Amino acid sequence: MSNKNSLLEKEKTQILTQPEKNENITENLGTTFIPIKKTSSNIMSIFVLLIFIFILVLLLIFSIFTIYNTLNPNIISGVSIKGLDVSGLSPSDAKYQLDNYLADKLPEEIKVKHKDFETTISLSQMDIEFDTKTASNSAFQIGREGNVFENNLSILSTRFGNINIEPNITLDKQLLTKNLEDISTQLPDTVIQSSYYIEGNELLITPGKEGSVVDINPTIEAIKNSIATFSALDQPVEIVTKTQQPDDIDVEKIYHEVRKDPVDAYYTKEPFAVFPSENGVDFKISLEEAKALITAEKKEEYSIPLSIIQPKVTTNMIGTEAFPDLLSTFSTNYAASNRNRTTNLTLAANKVNGTVLMPGETFSYNKVVGARTISAGYKEAPIYVEGRVEDGLGGGICQITSTLYNAVVYANLEITQRTNHQFVPSYVTASRDATVVYGSIDFQFKNNRDYPIKLVCSVSGGVANFQIFGMKQEDDCEVQISSYETGRTPTAIYSEAYKILKRGGQIIDKQLLSKDTYKRH
């Protein structure tokens, strides 16, 4: 029993002393945990150091990248102008390559059309210009316009995303407007303005007709956009038109333009001056009756009877004394065997022959010659209609206009209105012609001399001749005309004409007369 108790006491003692062992274990564990904490701290330090080194590397790369791009004298990668890659080029090299690229890309002419009507306009006659210098400079500024961070971001995004710059395009709006106004008169459905002329003892008034005219500003924008996008290379530009009504017939205005008293011709010697005769003209009916006649019903032509009062002394009566000097002369040839055409030439020439223009006075071919009608004696002869040769009333009278035009240029008179034919005529070379269409296209010039001039015209033996008489002045010059083709395409002929003024054998001035476009047969 005592042994059993002593055994229990021994176990109890072991149990009671066990916490001391656990405590020692804990202390032992505690003493071994301290080295583990020191190792983790070292790892953290290494991690921080690596991050710091990484940031330094990034900063170094960033700095090198920034310095390189700052010192880079060329356009950055990924930049194009008008679709042409200019990466790595200097602004001047980019401009040079772009100018050559555009010169090769752009056509010599563009086509414009309205319904079935089609014609061409030369780019040289519009003075088209792309602002390649500004575009090249803008390309160079990409990646250089902001702060360091913005520039680097722009460079990276451009390298991977690419940028295309569209250069500004400019053109001579005034010159193109003149071309479009000329085209407007050629439209097959163009508006026809009312007009009048005197035939014998009658004032004949032809009413205008509604038609289409070129809407200038929208058409210019359409042409500009087509050239800017290169779409004009393949497709003609549609002419923007608008419907226009002709002006109402203003009978009262016509009356005040027509009505005048007769004036006898005379001239003075000191100072020398010629005062031409003028027929007196008046309505045979009252102004109210004339207005009622126009508004009563619609007609193709209205006739108002006139009273023509002849002067006692006409300009022709004072003869060569009033017009002592031949200022210029010009002739063209015609086929006398074509009787109808010859008749038309003679009728038109007779209308112009003997016309006297005072200083500052303007000559209008359509007003002097009048409408080409059957009642006026005109015959059917070949004319151009929408690019085709057809018989038309009054065909051939443009030869009289062209002959007069050249005589006027040689006399150094001021041309105020002149239009070239659709095709180069047979009787003069390109840019030496002048066409007329009654009611829409006129030929006009002004007597810009100090003295009156007289037009003398004859049609005989296959030769149409104009002579312009007047009085020579101290400042008169010898006049030469230089005309030549500037280019040809499959559809058009381009030409220019210049008036060259000489004095004492030396050229003192050279003036542009016209730049013209003709269709090819």
Image: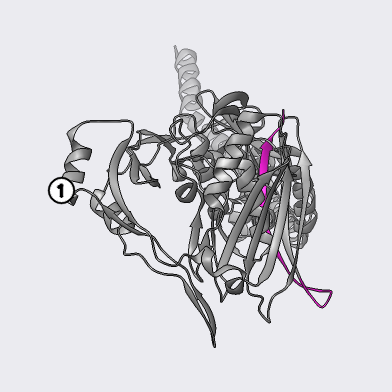
Q: Nearer the viewer, residue 155 or 303?
A: 303
**How many other residues sit within 10 Å of disc 1, few (<14), some (14-19) or many (≥20)?**
few
Q: Nearer the viewer, residue 231 or 15?
A: 231
Give the residue at mark 1: 288
- Kindly state the secondary structure of the residue where label 1 is placed: helix
Q: For this view, does 309 lie left or right of residue 36?
A: left
Residue in the picture at 50% in, 45% down: 181
Q: Is residue 283 magenta?
A: no
Magenta segment, prevailing SS (helix, strand or loop):
strand
Q: Nearer the viewer, residue 194 or 89?
A: 194
Residue in the picture at 69% in, 75% down: 476
Relative to 449, say whether 76 is above or below. above
Q: How many numbered marks, from 0 up?
A: 1
Magenta stretch: give its range: 502-521
Residue in the picture at 60% in, 74% down: 321
Question: x, y (%) of residue 99?
Answer: 75, 49
Question: x, y (%) of residue 260?
Answer: 31, 62
Q: Nearer the viewer, residue 125 or 290?
A: 290
Q: Is residue 520 magenta?
A: yes
Please, which residue is most extreme toward the bottom here? 270
Residue in the picture at 61% in, 65% down: 413
- The quadrant holding residue 31 is top right
- Amino acid carrying label 1: it is Glu
Question: x, y (%) of residue 348?
Answer: 55, 44
Q: Quadrant of the N terminus?
A: top left
Q: For this view, does 491 lie left or right of residue 226?
A: right
